[in-house]
Amino acid sequence: MVSLTTRTGEQDGTGAWRRAARMARTAVAWLGLLLAAGPALSEDGYELWLRYVPVAADHAAGYRARATELVVPAATPTAQATRDELQRGLGGLLGKPPPLAARAGREGAILVGTPASLPQLVALGLDLSGLGEEGYLLRSVRIDGRPATVVAANTDTGALYGAFRLLRLVQTAQPLDGLDIREAPRLKLRLLNHWDNLDRYVERGYAGESIWDWHKLPGWKDPRYTDYARANASIGINGTVLNNVNTSAQALTPLYLRKAAALAEVFRPYGIKVYLSARFSAPIEIGGLETADPLDPAVRQWWKDKAAEIYRIIPGFGGFLVKANSEGQPGPQDYGRSHADGANMLAEALAPHGGIVMWRAFVYSHEEPDDRHKQAYNEFVPHDGSFAPNVLVQVKNGAIDFQPREPFHPLFGAMPKTPLMMEFQITKEYLGFATHLAYLAPLYEETLRADTYAQGPGSTVARVIDGSLDGHVLTGMAGVANIGSDRNWSGSHFDQANWFAFGRLAWNPDLESAAIAGDWVRMTFSNDPAVVEPVVAMMMGAREAVVDYMTPLGLHHLMGRGHHYGPGPWVSGGPRADWTSVYYHRADAQGIGFDRSASGSNAVAQYVPPVAGRFGNVDTVPEEFLLWFHHVPWDHRMASGRTLWDELVLRYGRGVDYVRGMRRTWDGLSGKIDAERHAQVAAFLAIQEDEAQWWRDASIAYFQTFSKRPLPAGAEPPPHPLSYYQSLEFPYAPGDGK
Ligand code: GCW
């Protein structure tokens, strides 16, 4: 195309020019046909779920009749972004963008805006109450007797979200007739947390370097930042913490604030606020003070001045995320103060500007505890009620650390006077990095639906974090991002689904993971049921397979030391016992598992009695948490009738078999998915099969040294001796903390 255009420009004489222009048009038309054919052309994944490829030919006429003109005022940057997206999206989906109009005049017009921006909406008398600042209404209406589709909201941001919803309907082959959709987000803060360092290294990142090219900011604003904002807005994400929670104080210097401001400027039209991780000792490191004691007046003043400076440089700044007194990070306890003292000091500095503090509950006491599971609860529950109103406590989904499966964190339901924010991990630190296919929505969903019983049955984690259980208005969900400089953003095509699902669940924590997967597959690969059905089915079981081949039946924290790559159930020694595997599995000649019942660490007592009772009793605990809460004899009878040892071995194998099944399914889709993405997924699945097998074999070889029992009939013995698995080293495995 490029060379054709150049050549036509060189023609002299209008006849020749017209001929060449005709040729160019023909070429473009052919290209369009090729694109419409879909899978033939290769794709690199950059477009994510916003590919906007032509709709199926038999649907095109119907959609075109419902998109004859676009009435989208563009008086603000957000409204302009909305118009641009609709033109781009509908242009791609329908072959060409509908013409713009100032008023709806034709049958099939699409109107998008607010009562303030679009007088025609006012006449329709739509009820926009209850939609708040981010909700929208999507409705089929009649204007002057002619059918039209309206996307109406109270704000431009709401209209933008509605526009993305409209596009999603077309992308997923839904009808545009009889629409009556009312949506408002259930959570106020829907945030990505980037664990990105200023040198572009991403802690637990498996998708290349940080996408923030700090060195070239603020002068160069990579267009990719706009695409990042588009992708996030399309799923309702409204904030991003740019830097790692293990941060250097430099992120708060004017040099870096100006860089962050440039990003904030790109994101603002898309309804996305910028937040920063704040290092607690910054007053010492960049402020020249001798202390960071939160009760010291000079320290408090320093933070107030810093907040004022930040808001001068970054208008609309969101606030701070803080990791304090955890894994060596500084914090208020260094001065004998509490988490509440620390959080409230920062909250006081931000409050005049409307900023918030997200104070993480992922903490470590200096002393090794009898059970790490109990730390956060012990340190935070006593402070319930003493946090400032603009503080949220950000709690990981489980009490240990983003394992393939954890019971819900006992803090949920235990701090009714404090807004608790959910922290999920999107990057797959413990679920096979980028190469393992593991769709995480079922993990998120399982936690959100778990019942804390804090106020009787129905007190789900979702209701704790959406504020409805305890009457909080400040609510939120954070996801540790899996985004990097890789062309496909997430390191693998399927990991894009985890970013997508996180955003959708942050908007509405009651959504079902299968429905989210369905939308994602349709938008990312194809609307062909021969693709959608098998791929959704494969995704839905994938996380359970990871649980099976890595940590079945409630086992946890058994990975390689430091980098967390591959199996390491033998990891022991080192600086802290609670950073080893043996601390968690406690295998011995009698059995395996961590006794957290009343006869052990009694972590179960941190749950409300009905839950504590169920988890604390070996006969009632769900099998998936058996070894999380109990030390169980090798010959314990499982529900299946097998012994624990046999069941364990079988589960490891079942996980590997599932991956084999995914490979078969995927191979069967060749030709239905573009060659480039198909080939990479196929290669990654092959890696996953090898590594699943490795996890299974290494784990069985190791645990057999304790169980001293034969493998159940039909189970293959590990091909290598245990010493082989223990000897493997991976010095440059990605993502390790630095
Ligand atoms: O999951 C663990 C990671 C650390 C991380 C820490 C945290 C950012 O291994 O790399 O540090 O949790 O959440 O703070």
Image (tube, rainbow, N blue to C red):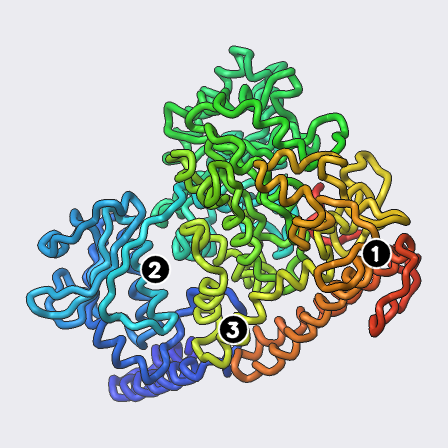
Residue labelled 3 has its Cβ within 8 Å of some atom of ligand 1: no
Write the residue at 57% across / 54% down: 443
Q: Does label 2 or label 1 sit earlier along the sequence?
A: 2
Q: Quadrant of the C terminus?
A: top right
Rendering coords of residue 652 (x, y %): 76, 63
User: In the displayed structure, would residue 66 be above or below residue 483?
Assistant: below
Q: Are marks 3 and 2 in contact (CB under 8 Å)?
A: no
Q: State the residue position of label 2.
A: 164
In-front residue for pair 729/342: 342
Q: What residue type is labelled 2?
A: Phe
Q: Is residue 449 left or right of residue 160?
A: right
Secondary element under disc 1, as helix, strand or loop, is loop
Residue 230, by quadrant, is bottom left
The numbered disc on residue 43 is 3
Residue located at (57% from left, 52% from top): 426
Q: Where is residue 174 in the image (x, y as percent from the top left)?
A: 33, 71
Image-based side of 717 in relation to 261, left or right: right
Q: Position of residue 188 (x, y in %)?
A: 39, 41
Using residue 20 as the reference point, say whether residue 458 is left or right of it: right
Residue type beneath disc 1: Asp
Task: Give the foreground label among 1 and 3.
Answer: 1
Q: Image point 39% across, 57% down: which residue?
A: 234
Element under label 2?
helix
Number of other residues with Cα within 10 Å of mark 3, as a class: few under 14, some 14 to 19, many 20 or more: some
Q: Which of marks 3 and 2 is nearer the N terminus?
A: 3
> What residue sits right under mark 1 in the picture?
635
Ligand number 1: quarter of image: top right
